[in-house]
Image (spheres, helix red, strand yellow):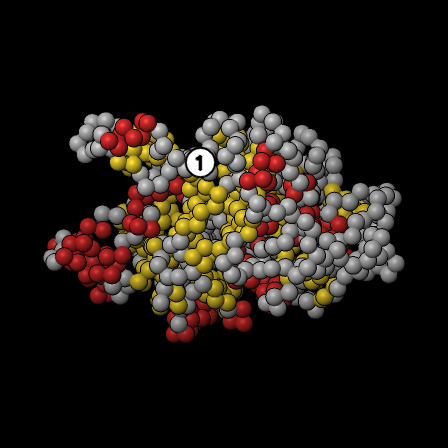
Amino acid sequence: MEAKLLPNYIAPSYYPEALLGFIGAVPVGSRADTGTLRTSSKVKQSGTRRLILAVDDAALDRLEELVDTHGSGRSARQAFEQIRRLEEFASPALSTVLRSDLGDDTTGDESSVWEAVLHPRAVRSGEPVPVDDDALERWITLVESRGGSVHTEFLRQVGGLTFMPIRASLTEAPELARFNPLRVLRPMPAIRPRPRFGLRSGSRVIPPATHGALADVTTVAVFDGGVHHSDDSGLFPIPVLDLTPEVADADDLDHGTGVTGAVLYGLLAAGGQAQQPPLPVESFRVMPPPYDAGDLDGYWILDRIKETLAEGKHKLVNLSLGPTLAVEDDMEPNRWTAELDQLAWERDIVFVVAAGNDGNQHPETGLHRVQVPADMANAVSVGACDAPAPDRPWARAPYSSMGPGRPGNRIQPLGVQFGGVDDRMFDVLRADGSFLEASGTSFSAPVVTHALADLATRLPRVNSSVLRAFAAHFAERHRAYKARQDELGFGRLPLSFADALDCGPDQVHVLFVDQIARGDILGYQLPLPRSFSSEAKMSITLAYASPVEPTQPTEYTSASLELTLRPNRNMFRFSPSQGSSEKARIADLTSAEARALLTSGWTSGQEPVTKTLTGSASLNESDLRDSGKWETLRHHRVSFAAGEVDDARLEVRYVARRAGALDGSPTEVPFAIIVSVSDPAATGTLYDDVAAQFAALRPVQRVAGRVRLRGGRQNSWY
């Protein structure tokens, strides 16, 4: 059954736990929906969710009795009060489960491959339990009785959900969709088509003067079409592993070679010399897969990616392929997104994912949105722009897929990089050093992978959160940044982060790397010296990895790191005595005004006042989510008036949720924060003043050692 919440009650603290417990309903998931949000000042349509509940007949009887009697006894009355939070309680609609348009011109007699997703059957110790064997057998029997077949060899279970490909005709799909444990039945998507290549004349690239990678802090994995062999070019002296038994396809090899070349060398120019690759790269050939397009190829490729990454060797992964499936407003769980997000969390892997090339589709179709798995919460998704840095003006390439993305990472793509356009194509490297030309996010993504690989060699401590934070923080904002965030994400991503590690006399960049336990509050002093009395500008980027719940698409990320900025250690809020008509004031705790207020019976707050980072002071849950409360990547910019700052500090608090309710179980989340401070007056002393006052800070120098991953409670400043 499904219980639709009113939008006023979507916060975890409003979860109707008493009601569900009283009637004996077990929450096994949720769906995205919309409803009418009513507050004292406005009425508007807003996002909400449907709770998916496993119930028996007795639970329905108790619910009916509760509605009729309004509850007798304390627990019953408490349960009845929570009914006010529901708009409806009903069986799932057929149109919700079946995701296919039964057009008049379709006979539906031909069988095709569908993806069936089944609900968990229960929850134990807070974890969803997949559907049992009895229900699976009933499902298989139903499919076969309607003339279909089930690919049991590809049954996969993720986060309590069961994903299973089946073959059935379109005319039988509505009957199959009535199977009650079924969450969704949708056509199986094909792997995205390759960009088309054109020939290009021009002088060849000279291989690097030095063989091998600059450092070995980790190894980069590229899953694509393989690499053309060339005995004498010296450009691709890397392992190429064939994971597919199929004979290599020439176009797939062109694509894989170009993608791998961009990972190794970044953006190349004809006639130049390639620089030494920053990290070792391994190419895994998964194209063509041993299945027909639109059949089981997506499942097979994802299995190969998982098997390879389970070895733990690769911490940076380039994916310039994926299903032809745009993220939808209903945000139904997807196996690619869920499994790779879980891998990213468990193994601290950075996936750099091409956003897709359907951005020129009509918005009403929804096909212009970023494509799976670029909707991951823990990844770097890359769109395409029409010019590389530092060329201006620049804009989104017309084909580049757009946001918003999935909750947990709504700003999608994270950013854009040059991917070629009709009048300025991308130079696609070939094995012999010559070029083809093409355009697509397939090529913008590996350019970013190369930049992040180079960054990993320059920092003394690297994890996935650090790399994601750098990407967002140092992206070049477009002049129409706010209006075009769904097109450009955080902006145009750097070709190299080397310049970001150098500070001028009027700027400071500081990186914090840490991890936080649930319920903790950590504080960090910000790099503004006490002697600094001018105006200042500050930008703050937070990135963290989060566990995910595929059964809860609107509550997809389980962790929220809340940021609080306290700019002045002495500025406090003072409240008048009870019954007074006077309004609260903010005053310097050391001032005569503060002493007079305290003498008159006023009380001061326990902590210094805060400066808003979200852009909205509203406490409405919908507004908080829109401003990024549960997003794993956040960027804020603030300005300070002269004299406003004194021992500024940034606080981080970790709140967890599970199944949409607040969670108290102990967990730790790694995170990275980058803070940049600049002096608009250009007095030329900011960097020196910070270095003099904060002796713990150390300039970043290139490190060519083993990567330090999660662990310990060490707090690092750079």
- Image coordinates of residue 354 in percent, x first then y, are 62, 49
Residue type of the residue flagged with mark 1: Pro
Question: Can the viewer see residue 188?
Answer: no
Residue at the spot of label 1 = 567
Q: How far across and how far down the image is residue 382, in percent? A: 61, 46
User: Which quadrant, please, contains the N terminus?
Assistant: bottom left
Q: Nearer the viewer, residue 710 or 79?
A: 710
Residue 508 visible within the image = yes
Residue occupying the point 68% across, 67% down: 243
Left/right of residue 381 with respect to residue 36 in the rendered view: right
Q: Residues within 10 Å of mark 1 (few under 14, many from 20)?
A: many
**Residue 391: % across, % down:** 71, 33
**Residue displayed at 43% across by 53% down:** 559
Q: Name the element at disc 1.
A: loop
Horizontal relation, residue 628 to residue 493: left or right: left
Residue in the picture at 74% in, 42% down: 426
Q: Going 35% across and 57% down the picture, which residue do you hit?
A: 663
The vertical placement of 271 against 191, above or below, is above
